[in-house]
Amino acid sequence: MKASIFSFMSKPSHQSAPHITPLSFFLLTFLLSWLIWIPLALSHFNVGPFKISEDISSIIRLLGVIMPMVSALLLTAIYGGRPAIQSLLSRLKIWRVGWKWWIAAILVFPALLVIAGMMFNLFSCQPLISLLPITPAVLLANIIFLAIASLGEEIGWRGVALSALLQRHSPLIASSILGIVWATWHIPFWILIDTLSHYGTGYFVLNYIFIVPTTFYITWVFINSRGSLLLPVILHLVFNIINVALFPVTSTTGSFAVFVGLQLVLMLIIILKLRKGTDINYENSIPKI
């Protein structure tokens, strides 16, 4: 039986999300990730008595990226045990969701990247955004790393955090909260990789804003794909592969601003769709224990 995306929120539930509160997930994730990133950032900027080599730091800092998944699995194990973990991870197998949602996950953000790059190249006097030369071996290494990072983030942010928020709030409010929290979580990592010192304050602010419309879009895909975690992972991965390894639109402030502007237009469209409260089967969109 289908229910409105808004009416479902008031139903009594036996799922895991009411037990794993958004706050508990946020606090644990911030604690685990920031305990890795902040000491590395202090060492990077020669603050304090300890110095960690950049080679070691570049490896250790990646552990912080998978802490949302670690938090999700820890909390799910505490509140639901092995069955709840199996239920959560089984969402990575949900792929029969309709072709249009695969298009939404795979093609929309890359299309925005291409459009933003073309618009920037057409009107800017700065160096053009172009395809990067890359060998198959380097591309494969990027795909492996970015796949681990995408899994590490999406199992936590969508699998537990979004599900828990949707038990308590409308998709609009849930996306707003998650977008701000998700962006804030990145701040020490961005500082550690010299985003602020290399690109300046404007780029740093764009990085923060970029996360919010991204969150709205992933929420829309998530609730229309029966709570699939596979599609958010694929969306995250495809975007990162194209933007990091192939067509780096976010590598300059100007082209990044164009892309974020297109994202904000898309976010307004998504908000209008979410406000309609169309029928979605929420019974399959929230993890159970």
Image: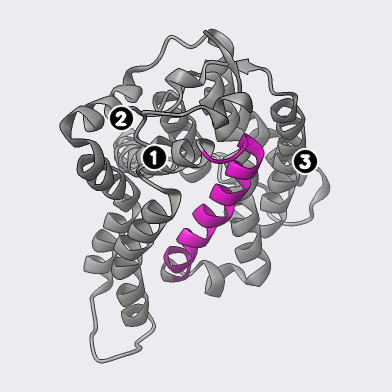
Find residue 72 and report its image quarter: top left
At label 2, the amino acid type is Leu
Q: Is residue 246 above or below residue 21?
A: above
Q: Quadrant of the C terminus?
A: top left
Image point 30% across, 30% down: which residue? 88
Instruction: Please tell me the numbered disc located at residue 119.
Output: 3
The residue where tag 1 is placed is: 160
Whole-angstrom CA distance, mark 1 to mark 3, is 37 Å
Q: Where is residue 128 in the image (x, y as percent from the top left)?
A: 68, 48
Of badges 2 and 3, nearer the viewer stands 2
What span is colored magenta in the figure?
Answer: 168-191
At label 1, the amino acid type is Val
- Depth check, front residue: 228 or 99: 228
- Packing grade of label 1 (10 A; few <14, some 14-19, many >=20) is many
- Depth check, front residue: 159 or 112: 159
Q: Name the magenta segment's main secondary structure.
A: helix
User: Can residue 130 be seen from the camera position used here?
Assistant: no
Instruction: Please tell me the numbered disc located at residue 88.
Output: 2
Q: Is mark 3 on a helix, strand or loop?
A: helix
Q: In this view, does 32 lie above or below 235?
A: below
Magenta stretch encompasses residue 114: no
